[in-house]
Image (cartoon, helix red, strand yellow):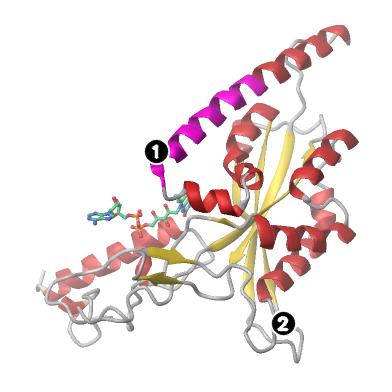
Amino acid sequence: LGNDQIGQHVNDHIVMPLGIYVVDKSIDVTPRDVYIPVFATTVWQPEPEQPGQETVCCFDFFSGNFERLWFMIAHLYLAFLFPNSIKRFVIRLPWLFNIIKNVIRVFLQGVNFIINLLWGLYNLVQGKPWHDDPSLITAAIKFNAAKEGCYSRDDSRIELDFFGEEEQSHFNQDKVVANSEIAKHMALLNGLGEQPHWLVKWFLRLVTKMPYEENQIEEYVDVYSRRFLLSEQHLSGGCLFGKAIDKGLDNAIDTGKVYGSANVYVADLSSVPLPRISTQMTAYLIGFHVAKRLCVGNGE
Ligand SMILES: Cc1cc2nc3c(=O)[nH]c(=O)nc-3n(C[C@H](O)[C@H](O)[C@H](O)COP(=O)(O)OP(=O)(O)OC[C@H]3O[C@@H](n4cnc5c(N)ncnc54)[C@H](O)[C@@H]3O)c2cc1C
């Protein structure tokens, strides 16, 4: 098509899981509380004279008993277990990914079984009912990566630039945002419930470095940016309105038409810059918008 704008502005959300807490027994955690997305929203603003652009961050909350929570967030924690070099390798081999995923699922079932058994026995010894496990809560912070990535035509892959530094100043906006917004919300996070037993906390910090105190945040962000890097799987922006595709301002019938093509149309999330809201809803909205404009163009 000769359209060199395709694949130039790809981006995704950075997701950083945060500590696990034990919910107060007086609070009734229901299945509806398992996933509360985009609950707390905060805006990071650069200080005067500081580089960078303001950005919106959201906190998602996950709560339930150990088993529910474990399955819900297992995919987040899996990222902590593999070093990036292995993740890079595995992602190119879907069959290997499937094998690892299923082995891990079986492993998780086994871990759950043992934990439920031990917990049940402990409850019985204490004279409590078999199922009296506490509810847990955890959160994740999510924000747009400051630097765009791109599609590499040579080897057909999308390269994101999470925690990318500015070339001249070495300013790393993603690090600054993560440090500042986690610190601002540490009191909220610590207010979610009680911190887990020190042994559990020690293990979590050993594997993930996730912070429970303000002075642990910088280390977590640094280690996370070098070793883990989770995307929210919200890729967008590869085929932007006005750059790679027609906005349809002159002719409604051209809305979404790829520049350089006679009849290729795009009506999905790739046509907009990364929103910091539900990408699914945004994709529906774009599909609806393009379809409506095409109807107008066809005189319907
Ligand atoms: C695990 C996961 C969890 C998510 N959770 C949420 C969430 O909770 N909330 C939220 O808002 N968003 C969520 N998202 C993101 C959301 O699903 C996407 O942002 C949204 O689906 C994007 O819509 P789309 O139409 O742009 O692309 P897609 O939904 O990816 O649609 C692309 C379609 O094109 C088809 N296709 C690809 N190549 C070809 C080809 N060559 N020929 C023909 N067809 C092709 C694919 O099969 C697919 O059906 C999640 C994504 C993932 C992966």
**Dot 1 amino acid type:** Trp
Side of 289 relative to 223 (left or right): left
The residue sitting at 85% across, 57% down in the picture is 216
Q: Would you name the residue on which mark 2 appears?
A: 46
The residue sitting at 69% across, 33% down in the picture is 29
The answer to whether residue 86 is above or below residue 286 is above
Front residue of this view, candidates 83 and 221: 83
Q: Is mark 1 within 8 Å of ligand 1?
A: no
Q: Position of residue 3 (x, y in %)?
A: 26, 81
Q: Position of residue 219 (x, y in %)?
A: 81, 60
Q: Is residue 55 visible?
A: yes
SS at badge 1:
helix
SS at badge 2:
loop
Q: Which mark is nearer the camera, 1 or 2?
A: 1
Q: Main secondary structure of the magenta part?
A: helix
Q: Is residue 240 magenta?
A: no
Residue 168 falls in image quadrant: bottom right
The residue sitting at 62% across, 85% down in the picture is 167
The answer to whether residue 129 is above or below residue 151 is above
Side of 280 relative to 219 (left or right): left
Q: Which mark is residue 95?
A: 1
Point out the stretch of residues depicted in magenta: 93-111
